């Protein structure tokens, strides 16, 4: 046990562990990109479940107008903890439902999971920090400094679920917007070929599965909601809320207006596709313009030392050989 404690408290061992974790994360990222079809099938399955739920809810409403419809139930340890501690009111976040939808999480279970980890992660991070700083090794730090580290770990744990959700939202939105102009072009082709908007959206969702799983899921869900929601405008508005991007919201508004006022849908799709391509191009230009500033620190830390070593290394070796030869000759 003492050997293990001595091992994990050495800085070089911690650095080796961190490098190993980063390498493992890189390998898992590459492998996850190869499993896009499996992820797509999982997402499409959830969309089909949502479609079946809308069917059941519609039939239940027809058979019993006073019914409130069917809802998913959430039972388990996390649900019991959240209900017993009343965490939904204690840690209430009015924008949580919209943010979870933006991240691709739907139903009551993600809400329970978020509030559970919002409550549990501060204690987990606090316990890990106490065990490492006060029990394993104090690193020669004063008690006040160690106390600040422990409290800081608890604060980080409190905000960790929000940071994770924000990262998921950003990744999902980026994936959607990279493929959205191409999806609009395909949708325009389908509509001009004579397909209905529901069939065109369903077809495009299948075609975009290999490019963006998130976009394929959103389009499949839009097709289901167009078929079973009482107002088609609600389906387009839900798409804009789930993505929370100006480009998608403008497309949803244009499609709603086209159906309301009878304007040509193909013309609106062509205009929206061009605008979204311009948005994608401007985003790429913005990233390219910010690249030199972001590369300054990596160049100073990694490129310049190697460059100096390559340039000055032979000269230093030659000077050492000359001085060594001169000393030997003397």
Image: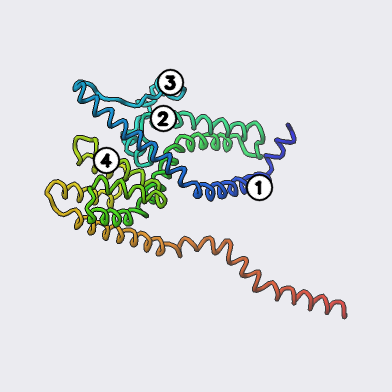
Tags 1 and 3 touching, CB below 8 Å: no
N-terminal-most mark, 2 or 1: 1
Label 2 – label 4 distance at C-alpha: 24 Å
N-terminal-most mark, 2 or 4: 2
> Can you tell which quarter of the image residue 298 is in?
bottom right
Select label 2 or label 3 by which is in front: 3
| The C terminus lies in quadrant | bottom right
> Can you tell which quarter of the image residue 284 is in?
bottom left
What mark, if any, has residue 115 been given in the picture?
2
State the residue position of label 3: 80
N-terminal-most mark, 4 or 3: 3
Select label 1 or label 3 by which is in front: 3
- Residue 152 is left or right of residue 61, and the answer is right
| Residue 171 point in image, percent of width and height | 41, 48
Q: Residue at x 35, y 38 (%)?
A: 47
Tags 4 and 1 touching, CB below 8 Å: no
């Amino acid at each position: 046990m003492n050997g293990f404690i001595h091992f994990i408290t050495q800085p070089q061992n911690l650095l080796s562990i961190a490098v190993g974790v980063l390498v493992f994360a890189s390998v898992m990222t590459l492998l996850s990109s190869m499993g896009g079809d499996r992820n797509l099938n999982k997402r499409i399955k959830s969309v089909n479940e949502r479609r079946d739920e809308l069917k059941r809810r519609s039939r239940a409403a027809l058979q019993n107008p006073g019914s409130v419809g069917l809802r998913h139930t959430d039972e388990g340890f996390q649900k019991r903890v959240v209900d017993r501690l009343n965490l939904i009111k204690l840690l209430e976040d009015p924008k949580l439902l919209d943010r979870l939808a933006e991240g691709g999480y739907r139903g009551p279970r993600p809400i329970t999971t978020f509030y559970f980890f919002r409550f549990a992660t501060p204690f987990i991070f606090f316990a890990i920090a106490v065990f490492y700083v006060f029990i394993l090794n104090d690193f020669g730090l004063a008690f006040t400094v160690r106390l600040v580290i422990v409290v800081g770990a608890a604060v980080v744990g409190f905000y960790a679920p929000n940071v994770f959700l924000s990262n998921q939202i950003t990744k999902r939105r980026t994936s959607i917007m990279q493929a959205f102009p191409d999806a609009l072009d395909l949708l325009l082709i389908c509509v001009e070929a004579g397909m209905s908007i529901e069939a065109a959206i369903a077809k495009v969702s299948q075609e975009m599965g290999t490019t963006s799983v998130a976009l394929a899921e959103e389009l499949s869900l839009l097709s289901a909601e167009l078929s079973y929601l009482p107002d088609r405008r609600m389906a387009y508005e839900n798409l804009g809320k789930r993505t929370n991007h100006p480009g998608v919201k403008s497309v949803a508004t244009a499609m709603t207006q086209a159906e309301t006022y009878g304007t040509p849908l193909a013309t609106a799709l062509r205009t929206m596709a061009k605008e979204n391509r311009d948005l994608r191009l401007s985003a790429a230009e913005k990233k390219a313009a910010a690249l030199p500033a972001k590369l300054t620190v990596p160049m100073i830390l990694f490129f310049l030392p190697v460059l100096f070593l390559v340039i000055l290394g032979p000269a230093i070796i030659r000077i050492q050989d000359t001085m060594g030869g001169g000393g030997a000759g003397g």
